[in-house]
Image (cartoon, grey):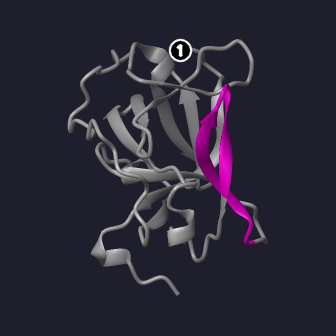
Amino acid sequence: VPEPDPDPEPDPDPDPDPTPTGAVYEKITSTDGLLAGSKYLIVYEQEGTDASRTMGEQNDDIRSYAEVTVTNGKVVVGDEDAKSVHAFTLGGTSGAWTLRDANDGTYLSYSGPKNKLYSVVSVAGDNECWDITFSGGNAMIENKAESGRFVSTFCLLHQCTEACRSVP
């Protein structure tokens, strides 16, 4: 089991900026799309509707959500969504990824025993580390401290560079 890296490289900005407006995120479907230092949205796609949901701010022991529209595997974060949509900077390494909230600088953490998801200010161990695999094109984000505890089955959308900014 890989040890968590309390100082991930590249080091995330200690004063994170909110999710940028106009940012384009594209769905990834394999571990080839996981790049440390890149930003991702964790999205629950509601097939056949335009009411998909992405993680929002932390509320006690759960996260709120923001509605987004996934079009051809992409999401554009509009001005009205920038504060409610929370992107995550991927840190660590394969098998022990960290997910740092780009809006508030905290890390996703599971400390059990119930289906709760917390945010903490630093990486202290496996509770803040996640194994990310893919099944059927969706991400399976499993906590390293507690095997079988998943964020859920979500799709991951990677923040695009100029090469993929054309969204129909």
Q: Amino acid at mark 1?
A: Ala
- Secondary element at tag 1: loop
**Residue 164 percent coordinates (x, y):** 37, 76
Q: Name the residue rendered at 46%, 65% in the picture.
A: 25
Front one among 55 and 137: 55
Which quadrant is home to the N terminus?
top left
Farthest residue, direction left = 10
**Residue holding disc 1:** 145
**Residue 84 percent coordinates (x, y):** 58, 54
Q: Which residues are magenta?
A: 50-66
The reply to whether residue 40 is in sight is yes
Front one among 13 and 45: 13
Q: Main secondary structure of the magenta part?
A: strand
Which image quarter: residue 6?
top left
Q: Is residue 24 magenta?
A: no
Badge 1 density bin: few <14, some 14–19, many ≥20, Cα 10 Å: some
The reply to whether residue 76 is in sight is no
Q: Name the residue rendered at 60%, 14% in the picture.
A: 111
Q: Name the residue rendered at 43%, 72% in the picture.
A: 22
**Residue 103 percent coordinates (x, y):** 44, 46
